[in-house]
């Protein structure tokens, strides 16, 4: 099963997280299938590759709670709701 989750990058005390599509059995710093965005909690910036995220969600990938919250704050799901 594939999940969308955070992968820690950056240096000590200055973390930046990549949003990656990764196999559930892989560890946090393991090899990812695809990089689909990043999140900087210090500057509170988010970049997401919308077509790639949609592709993985359509294929059945599950976002973790944190990634879901980040995408929700970026209004990712708001524009995709029917009606």
Image (cartoon, rainbow, N blue to C red):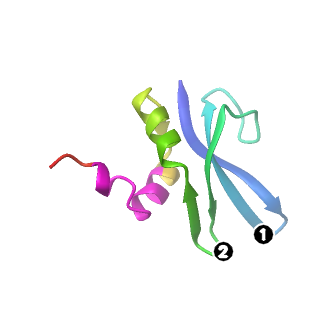
The reply, left or right, for residue 11 in relation to residue 28 is right
Tag 1 or tag 2, which sits nearer the N-term?
1
Residue 40 within the magenta-colored segment of the rendering: no
The reply, left or right, for residue 12 in relation to residue 7 is right
Q: Secondary structure at mark 1?
A: strand
Q: Residue lying furthest front in this view?
A: 51
Residue nearest the viewer, comparing 83 with 70: 83
Instruction: Kindly identify which numbered label has been placed on residue 64.
Output: none
Q: Which of 15 and 56 lies nearest the eye of the viewer? A: 56
Q: Which residue is mark 2?
A: 42
Residue at the location (47% across, 34% down)?
Answer: 55
Going by the image, does 23 lie left or right of 57?
Answer: right
Q: Residue at x 42, y 64 (%)?
A: 73
Q: Magenta span: helix, strand or loop, mainly?
A: helix
Q: Quadrant of residue 24?
A: top right
Q: Position of residue 25 (x, y in %)?
A: 65, 26
Residue neighbourhood size for the residue with mark 1, other residues' Cα within 10 Å, grouped as few (<14), some (14–19), many (≥20):
few
Could you tell me residue 49's position as x and y percent? 54, 49
Residue at the extreme top of the image, as rendered: 1
Q: Secondary structure at mark 2?
A: loop
- Image point 71% across, 41% down: which residue? 28
In which quarter of the view is residue 39 placed? bottom right
| Rendering coords of residue 1 (x, y %) | 53, 23
Q: Is residue 15 above or below residue 52?
A: below
In this picture, which residue range is highlighted in magenta? 68-80
Label annotation for residue 14 = 1
Estimate the spatial distance between the alpha carbons at disc 2 and disc 1, rounded to whole Å: 8 Å
- Pick out the residue farthest to the left: 83
Q: Residue at left 66%, top 31%? A: 33
- Find out whether the residues at labels 2 and 1 contact each other: C-beta distance under 8 Å: yes
The x, y position of residue 38, in whole percent, is 63, 56
């Amino acid at each position: 099963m594939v999940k969308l989750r955070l992968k820690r990058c950056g240096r000590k005390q200055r973390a930046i997280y990549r949003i990656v599509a990764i196999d559930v059995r892989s560890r946090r710093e393991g090899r990812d299938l695809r990089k689909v965005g990043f999140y900087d909690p210090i500057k509170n910036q988010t970049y997401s590759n919308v077509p790639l995220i949609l592709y993985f969600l359509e294929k059945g990938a599950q976002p973790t709670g944190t990634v879901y919250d980040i995408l929700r704050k970026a209004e990712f799901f708001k524009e995709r709701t029917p009606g």
